[in-house]
């Protein structure tokens, strides 16, 4: 969901906020996981929890847009932690990740236990398209989440029990766990952007 990207940061001309340079490891870890790590096996197993998860996924593009609206290029190119991705890279990563999420749901709903294709997210965040403004990725998230939510709202409890196989984790993952993972993923990276804004003067 995020990885070290020092070479990408250098290539993109990232700006380091002075107070983050001499942080202790525990402080950096708090910046890396501001909402805590995802607990493997967490599942949305009640109608109420599934509805809450779907609502969070539906609201996410607007919540992210509100946090990046009006940021200047220097603020967008500020890493959210020492050695971490910039705000711009986080936004582009979210588009990459959630496109894959929609495809993984559709694969699991149309095939029996398909094996999904992992990708090297740190290398994706070093590619030339990541230098683009964030607007294209925000538009991608609008469309992906619109389709994703329509799909999620159509699913039965039995559909959420369907699985795909994740070769990196070497296990089958039910969709009622995957939806929790991506709710966490959105909160995780949104908190990165909010934290970076707090430290670099964005929105305040």
Image (cartoon, grey):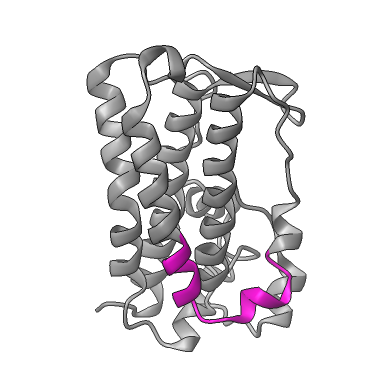
Residue at the far front in the pictured view = 110
Q: Is residue 196 left or right of residue 40?
A: left
For this rendering, which residue is in front, 161 or 198?
Answer: 161
Residue 34 seen in render = no
Q: Is residue 129 magenta?
A: yes
Give the vertical position of 52 relative to 197 (above or below). above
Q: Report the label total.
A: 0
Magenta residues, as a range? Answer: 125-140
Type of secondary structure dominating the magenta stretch = helix
Give the vertical position of 203 relative to 109 (above or below). below
Give the residue at x 55% y 62%.
Answer: 23
Q: Position of residue 92 (x, y in %)?
A: 55, 65
Q: Position of residue 59 (x, y in %)?
A: 27, 50
For this rendering, which residue is in front, 173 or 169?
Answer: 173
Q: Position of residue 18 (x, y in %)?
A: 52, 79
Give the residue at x 74% y 48%.
Answer: 119
Dividing the picture into quadrants, the one containing residue 67 is: bottom left
């Amino acid at each position: 969901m995020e990885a070290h990207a020092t070479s990408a940061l250098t290539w993109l001309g990232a700006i380091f906020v002075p107070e983050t340079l001499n942080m202790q490891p525990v402080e950096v870890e708090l910046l890396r996981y501001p909402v805590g790590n995802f607990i493997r096996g967490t599942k949305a197993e009640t109608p109420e929890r599934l509805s809450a998860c779907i609502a969070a996924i539906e609201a996410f593009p607007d919540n992210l847009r509100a946090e990046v609206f009006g940021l200047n290029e220097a603020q967008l190119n500020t890493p959210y932690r020492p050695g971490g991705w910039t705000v711009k890279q986080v936004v582009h990563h979210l588009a990459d990740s959630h496109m894959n999420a929609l495809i993984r749901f559709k694969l699991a709903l149309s095939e029996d236990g398909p094996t999904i294709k992992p990708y090297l997210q740190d290398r994706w965040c070093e590619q030339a398209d990541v230098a683009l403004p964030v607007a294209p990725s925000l538009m991608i998230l609008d469309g992906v989440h619109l389709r994703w939510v329509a799909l999620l709202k159509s699913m039965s409890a039995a559909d959420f029990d369907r699985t795909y196989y994740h070769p990196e984790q070497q296990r089958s993952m039910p969709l009622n766990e995957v939806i929790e993972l991506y709710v966490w993923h959105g909160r995780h990276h949104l908190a990165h952007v909010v934290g970076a804004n707090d430290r670099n003067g964005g929105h305040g």
